[in-house]
Image (tube, rainbow, N blue to C red):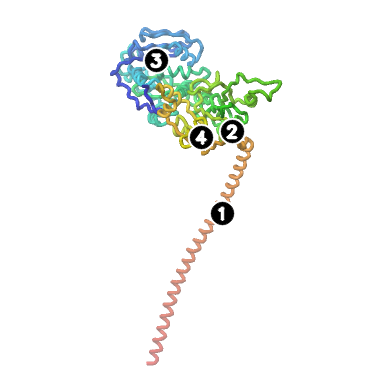
Amino acid sequence: MTARIVGNDYRSLTPPALGSWTPSLRVSVVVPAYGDQEKLDLTLAGLAAQTYPVALTEVVVVDNGSSPPLRLPALRPANTRLLVCPVPGRAHARNAGLAAATGDVIHWLDSDVVLDRRSVEAHMRWHHAAPYLVVTGYLRFTPAALPAPEVVAAADDLAKLFEPAEPHAWLVDLVERTDGLTANPHRAFSLHVGGATSVNAALFAAAGPMDTDLILGQDTEMGYRLAQAGAVFVPEPLSRAFHLGPTMRMRDKAPIDRVSHAFVADRIPSYRWLRSHPTRQWKVPYVEVVVEPGGPGGYAYDEVRATVDAVLAGTLPDVAVTLTGPWDRVGAEGRAPLRNPDLDLVLIRGHYAHEPRVRFAGEVPAVPGTPAVPASPAWAVPYRLRLPAGWVPGEDTLARLVDLAGDEGYGLVSVLLAEGDDGATGPTGAGAERAVVRARLERAAAFARAAIVLEEGEDLDDAVDDTFGVIWVDGETYGFAPEAGVLPGRRGAYRARAEAAAEVARLTKEAERLREQVAKWRDEAGRWRRSAVELRREVGTLRKELAAARKIVQYGLLSSVKRVITRRR
């Protein structure tokens, strides 16, 4: 039974301790290289000292057009080959090495990286635990002088040769702030860096080779496609390596990001912050909506139009629509078009023929990973919504469903659209089965993972539930309706935004006026308080004067009485 990992929580696996197990998988270490023979010699010297069995290891060095040509040094692993890839670019060189590799696992290694002697073994112990892993070691960047290859091969601890060195700060930070990539599983693919990463070869068979159209960012884009193929990403601290000199990203991070972001935005839908434009389309959309016939009679033009138009008018513009059907047989009837038995199909294709977001295809595979359209990037789309024609999503329905799946990590969100008595199963009543009409939002990575771990006779949805989770939601709650409503329209939406902005401006102005009025009242209240204090002081003074006057009056009366009494005597 294939081990089942939930999300990216590889901690459910228990790899064997180094040196205490017997491996069986073959590993191909692919080393693309361009010039710098001295560093390549050290890389191969480090590989010659690995603890992983020599009989299970092959090394493929790919010379990417060096002048003078690279050569294989005497100190190298036994099964080492040198290929030449004259087409410039690391992606081309890696693809050449990938095509020549014969191992069960592909281990990328840069030609200026020296592995600790236990590094390959540390990688491979994980690959023996599950067949869908991507393992990355920890790189440190050293400014140390280059030792002789013999010194590297004999060293038990490379730190003695290359420290002090700087860590791969970005990678370390990513691992630490995501609890080892388990707390944010849908960004774990960023761990795929080509300096010292190993991948099960079956994942490359599903995800394809590296994208040679990219200038930079090939590692990240490859990691994204590996994730879509079902990969789990593992950081391995016991795999240590030293990069001979600083990395290019450490030297020029800002210009590198500027270049790579311009390209990967088109190919990695998960990087939502790179897709801030409200309406433009991308090479790989965020969601593919597969509109399926709503009944046994096939597509009805009006139903399809209601569904497709609502999808395209929603708040999630980063979407593509696939219409499956026998489109190859559809043809126009010149003499009697109204009697054409495929009239609805003709109308559908004619109506959306020039809408770039709508694609016509045969049957879409149940398991993501196979292109829905030849030469189409649809297989890399992270989410697929299967929706019966005639059911109309609300303006924000699709965005809400994707948020639910993304925030909670579900592999499948099943949407209950309708249910009723199924006349085909027998009479209605307490024992009658219920016919359920539903939509399905499928996470491509979850279904690819489920296909890897699926056991014979098991339902695919059950495997998805085990690895990512499944939830049912009510269609009406999420805005689905059985008939078309009035689409807001872009101009109507603009007017609504303009009116809302005007109302905000009015309320802001009113709030400012009220704030000024409040400030005025506060000033006036302050004056009143000061006046009250002065009045209290005056009252106090008057009280004192009154008390003094009373004393004077009392003293005067007393004196007068004494004089009168004295006179009478």
Q: Which residue is mark 2?
A: 310
Say what secondary structure mark 3 lies in. loop
Q: Residue 421's mark?
A: 4
How far is mark 3 from mark 1, CA to CA? 76 Å
How far is mark 4 from mark 2, CA to CA? 28 Å
Q: Which residue is mark 3?
A: 104
Image location of residue 7, percent across then percent down: 41, 28
Say what secondary structure mark 4 lies in. strand
Q: Which callout, 4 or 2, points at the residue further toward the start of the chain? A: 2
Q: Residue 327's mark?
A: none
Q: In screen coordinates, is 195 left or right of 160?
A: right
Say what secondary structure mark 1 lies in. helix
Q: Residue furthest left?
A: 20
How far is mark 3 from mark 4, CA to CA? 51 Å
Q: Which callout, 3 or 4, points at the residue further toward the start of the chain? A: 3
Mark 1, other Cα within 10 Å: few <14 / some 14–19 / many ≥20: few
Residue depth check, mark 3 versus mark 4: number of the one nearer the observer: 4
Residue depth check, mark 4 versus mark 1: number of the one nearer the observer: 4
Q: Which residue is mark 1?
A: 517
How far is mark 3 from mark 2, CA to CA? 46 Å
